[in-house]
Image (cartoon, grey):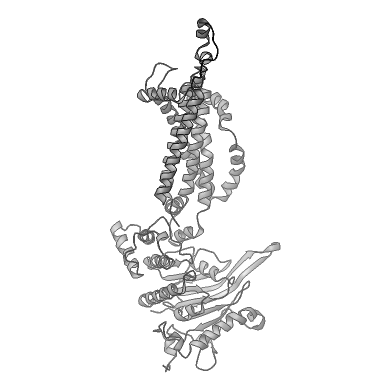
Amino acid sequence: MTSDKFISIEGIAKRYPGAGGGETAVFENLWLSMPRGEFGCVIGHSGCGKTTVLNILAGLDDPSEGVVIVDGQGIEGTSLDRAVIFQSHALLPWRTVLGNVAYAVTSKWRRWDKARVKAHAQKFIDLVGLTGAEHKRPSELSGGMKQRVGIARALSITPKIMLMDEPFSALDALTRGTLQDEVRRICLETGQTAFMITHDVDEAIYLADRIFLMTNGPGAVLAEIVENPLPKDRARIDLHRHPHYYALRNHIIDFLVSRSKTFAATVTNHDPRNVPVVRIGLSEPMLVTPAVVGGQDVSGTMPAVAR
Amino acid sequence: MTKSLRFRAAIMSIVIFLAFIGTWHLATRGTTTVATMSPEYAKLMGITATQGKSAMPGPLDVGAKLWEHVKRPFYDNGPNDKGLGIQLAYSIARVGIGYLLAVVVAIPLGFLIGMSPLINRALDPFIQILKPISPLAWMPLALYTIKDSGLSAIFVIFICSVWPMLLNTAFGVAAVRKEWINVARTLEVGSVRRAFTVILPAAAPTILTGMRISIGIAWLVIVAAEMLVGGTGIGYFVWNEWNNLSITNVIIAILVIGLVGMLLDQILARFTRMVTFPE
């Protein structure tokens, strides 16, 4: 059963006390919703509050205003339903790979005996391709392997949502590509709902069903939602051969390069509750009304893709 | 290469040791007769005057006396003549008790200070004032209130070892990486379990460093404290042998104090290595 608003961010704001007694708003009145099973990516420049949005979603941070509803319930603090993959992998260095994953497993299922915890953790270590490295400490692993452990730890608690804060930004390009493949495979296989922050346009195009574009902070807004026109079974190697690839890529880069700065000044009738949805077609990118957007099966709206 | 470096260092250490012993021996051995004097007078003056023999014992005297102590470490001929082993046992016991009391107080309190900025700020002025006080300055107050010299010595050990542990624990706990805390938070780990599974292991190297500093200070202070309170202990032994004018025994005591101090330090160093994690 696909819910239209599995995650619903409703009018959240984050303000910090500014210099001279006033308050600086990182963002105000932010609305965003995602259906179950969708992969959403937020793109924006540093300081636009992407990480704050993710931390609020995770429950690590509280919004100054507004609420977040997940699966029909307002969130309050952190939850085992929402797993976080940290940018810095955040493994506990005094525990082994197995120990790190098992820590998450015992946190979720406190009454499980050791053998059951171990078997469950092992399943997810195998899933991310770390079989054989169970008893290594994080310091003995490469950056990519550490992040694999982070992914295994997040998946092992079978969360409703995976939250990823630039998980691959600290990795080299080759490792990043492999891990993106892994994450995409796992999310497609398990129907995982995922919310990811990135500043890598290609990463967003490869992974996301919808891409959320945020303007520069302070006072950042969610400017546009871009639907990914690429088919669901896209592969990394022929991504750039897809006829819509460059239109999509150019649209996002144009936004990041120029429109993210001038958005607030040029667009006066922006309604944060009805953020325009951009659908990239063979012609120029066009805006569609948000009401038209239904489920997450974006590839279905793109018939007759030239190959 | 490493092995040869270690080998060369060992050779050099031995050479330095032999040179030291040799110089010591030469400096303290008897020289030729200084002056001719009547036998009665010479008898009166002793070998120091008649043979130019130094009052400072040579390495051979010290070695012979040390061997006696090693052979009979636990004899007890009354209050002023106990074996070196007994005296050391008293000192180690005092240090042990005072130190463990300090651990029991400093680590939970340090946790509290590290986790609560409010308590940190509230207690800071007290800690800043109490910390630089020489532990021996507490002695008269301890003697007056506790009315027991043995317990007073233990109190002095407690008060001198509590500060490094307290400050290091507070610092270690406060400096635990935010991301590790966040991991525990996203996994809905309760605060008690979080303290034991995340904060304690993360802060353990810092805490153990504090404990290592403390044991060193405690061992420094016990000698002085026992000189003051008297009765038993290696510090009392040093002072008693000084009163007996037995420089040989004083030198032996100095040597033994150094050895025990090194041993205590090495034990704590081993514990520190056990809890240290590479990042």
- B275 vs B28, nearest the viewer: B28
- B274 vs A192, nearest the viewer: B274
| A250 vs B34: above or below | below
Does residue B35 show up? yes
| B93 vs B51: above or below | below
Q: How many marks?
A: 0
| B155 vs A247: above or below | above
Q: Residue B71's x, y, as percent? A: 35, 24
- Quadrant that contains the C terminus of chain B: bottom left
Residue at 45 percent across and 67 percent down: it is A85
Q: Residue B205's x, y, as percent? A: 46, 49
Residue A71, image quadrant: bottom left
Question: Is residue B126 shown left or right of residue B221?
Answer: right
Q: Residue B278's x, y, as percent? A: 44, 55
| A212 vs B221: above or below | below
Q: Residue A127's x, y, as percent? A: 34, 70
Question: Is residue B65 shown left or right of residue B124?
Answer: left
Residue at 42 percent across and 77 percent down: it is A36
